[in-house]
Amino acid sequence: MAEPAAPAVRMRGIHKHFGAVAANAEVSLNVASGTVHGIVGENGAGKSTLMSILYGFYQADSGQIEVFGQKANIRNADDAIALGIGMVHQHFMLVDTLTALENVMLGAEPHWLIERAEAQVRSKLNALMASTGLQIPLDSLVADLPVGDRQRLEILKTLYRGAKILILDEPTAVLTPQETTQLFGVLKRLREQGNTLILITHKLKEVMALCDVVTVMRAGQVVAEVPIAVASIESLAQAMVGRKVMMGRALESPTHKGEMLLKAEHVSVTDSLGVQRLKDVTLSLHAGEIVGVAGVSGNGQSELMDVLTGLLTPHLGQLTLEGHDFTPPHWLDPSRARKLGLAHVPEDRHARALVMAFAAWESAVLGYDDLPDYSQGGWMNHSHMRQATADMMERFDVRPRDTELPSSKFSGGNQQKLVLARELGRAPKVLLVGQPTRGVDIGAIEFIYAQLRALRQKGCAVLVVSSELDEILALSDRVLVMNQGRIAGELPIAQCTEAALGLLMTGGAA
Amino acid sequence: MNTLPRWADLVLLPAVSLLVALLAAGGVVALVGQDPLEVIQVLVHGAFGTARGISYTLYYATTFVFTGLAVAVAFHGGLFNIGGEGQAVMGGLGTGLVALWWSAFLPAWLMLPIMMVSGALFGLAWAAVPGYLQAYRGSHVVITTIMFNFIASTVLVYVLVNHLRPKGSMSVESAPFAASAKMPGVHEALGAIGIDWPSSPLNLSVMLALLAALAVYFFLWRTRAGYRLRAVGSSPSAAEYAGVRAHRQVLVAMSISGALAGLVGMNEVAGVSGKLMLEFVSGAGFTGIAVALMGRNHPLGIVLASLLFGALFQGGAEVAFEVQGFSRDMVVMLQGFIVLFSGAMTYVIAPILARLLGWVSKPFASKTTSGAAHG
């Protein structure tokens, strides 16, 4: 295919302010036609804002956009689509109760008789699927489709609408390693067919594997734009954070296991619909180790965490914590768990870990409000609570250091640091952490890893549930893999490879 | 980015809402051929211009404080208690029953506290049932409390007609209580210390209302129980994570809410009528919703909003009396506008106000705005 002279997208001098904060300042971006262009940066670096401007969600305060050499005024998503720009969102924009075909058609029905419309769309889609290799069952309800298929459907939807430029926002966040490989195959094929792809991600490994050129953003500005040939993961990470980052594993692992602190045996959970969420799960945690739980989201990890922290009572099983045995229906409850030295950093920060409407200091005592330094005789000691929160903020570098700010106004990373400060502050014997770094900046990730490792050195038993394999590999001493509510396998860290874990995650044998 | 600074949210926004409501109401007043300025002048004078007017305003406000606080406590527990009306009716019944039984034997210093506790307990019980159904059975509290309003008013009718009405009496009311069951009027209390004050329904319940507002403030923001109740109200799942039993907090919130509404009996039954009769609540339970809405569910805001509504009731009555061709319904319309603009329309006014403030403060480059939400 002949390379057109003009770049697919050219953005020049883009400025965008939200209040006093410059989300984008003097940003310029050149995306050559027929390439995969990566945009990386920490949360709040402005990459989503930039893409939202390109897709018409926001209007730039100033600056120019050219698409295929034509000056473009993109006021909304319709304008963007008309220019051949499509976006695949991180959270899928699909109607679960409609079929795949109906989802593609929705909003762009070619005929007022729905039967005719479906026939037309179907023939077009069949051609499209054949040429791109994006195969999905068109007549299945979206609710019944696996995540990988839903993502292919999203891509197909944008292609159907004539997109030549695809913006993909964190496309691999929900995929297994195998699905990711498959997706990359498709994306490469799309590139060969002359499409232009813009990939927003924070996974540098994927950038290295797929992109031709990568733009690094930091604090609203472009700090680097490099061809992939001269880029490395280290140099990109450094450009993103603005300093050197150490993410790799700490080398030594303890040779002997410490005392067993928590043991769960034969735990089974059935939900209200009769679906078995946990099947005969047995695990133990020992002092001074970090155990990783790997798996594709939704394979029982959340239920496991809830059972171990007392939020959910299983139907069968036994739990031993600090010499106390619990069997259903007299299961552990969260306040009892806390008193026995079990701390919990929940995976869902917004729904569980913080009360978003509360001031930081009110959220910072959540679950610990009955401790004698926070309250006596039912009366709360506000000044102690505020002081304790200020200390937590200092120790864990929570920004801004404002104890009165509502919890919802902190960035994800700072919310997480506040939660960690609260849960780690009482020297727990057992710590259960769900998705420790979801939505957290690289700089904060490094800090959080260091805290978890330090806790392990002090003899705490740590369980980390994460959907990021890199995280599991960076932290764990041994790894449990969950698949469909079972523990599909356990591997010491030395035997963990992405391929081996990926196989277990999808239900294959180790 | 349409977030208002705290002072604007608490002071400016209600003031602007009130102003807009007055302008809209003034427009309607002008449409029916009256002079809005004259009407507002009569209204303000009627509510605040005389000692008697002030007394009536405070008397109305007292009842609204109780029902407004009731709505607010439930709200902080994440519940919408529409049943203030019924709980106030039952509270009045509880107040009146003990007065009928014991006021002949007991002195006032013993009788009045008993009546207060009884009223609060009746209101509590009437709210606890929907609270229990919500917490443990999942029946929505909005539906059940509305239903309980109807049941409460028919229970009152039944008790009055079949049991409390003196033999041979044709009016649906109980026998009068003995003097020991009468909440002293403010004019009596002031008279006792030598201050001359015109006679009015205003009684010492007004102090009880202030105490209740203080107590609610301390409960919600100073005690652990209040903290947990608010945690459940804002985020049930986070509260569960913290080890708080959400079900129990729902029951607690509804119980306190009902007890507060039940105190209405002290103002209306013990303070004014001196006997049990129908219609002593007359919609105050519903006005409490508007009061809580306008007072942003904060005790101080509720006291202020109650004063406003009390003034509207009292001033409105004066207007209907003084201004030719201006009916009581016009006053109701004015109240409607205030509820509309201070409640529902707040979300329309707030962004506009935020933008205006943004223009004004732009040159100063305020540091309160934050772009943290953008990734």
Image (cartoon, coloured by chain):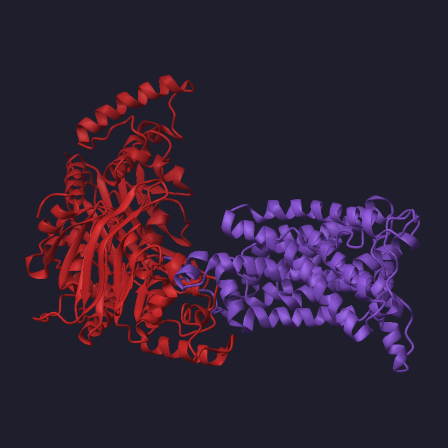
Chain colours: A red, B purple
Task: Judge left or right: residue A104 versus residue B80.
Answer: left
Q: Is residue A448 above or below residue B97?
A: below
Q: Nearer the viewer, residue A203 or B260?
A: B260
Q: Where does the image place residue A359, in percent across and percent down from the top left? A: 47, 68
Q: Where does the image place residue B310, in percent across and percent down from the top left? A: 78, 61
Q: Where does the image place residue A457, in percent across and percent down from the top left? A: 18, 75
Quarter of the figure that contains the N terminus of chain A: top left
Which residue is at 19% across, 58% downward? A283
Q: Is residue B293 visible?
A: yes
Task: Judge left or right: residue A419 versus residue A498.
Answer: right
Which residue is at 80% across, 71% downward? B204
Q: Nearer the viewer, residue A52 or B79?
A: B79
Which residue is at 59% across, 68% downward? B7
Q: Is residue B354 visible?
A: no
Q: Where does the image place residue B125, in percent across and percent down from the top left? A: 64, 57
Q: Is residue A388 above or below residue A291?
A: below
Q: Is residue B18 above or below residue A152?
A: below
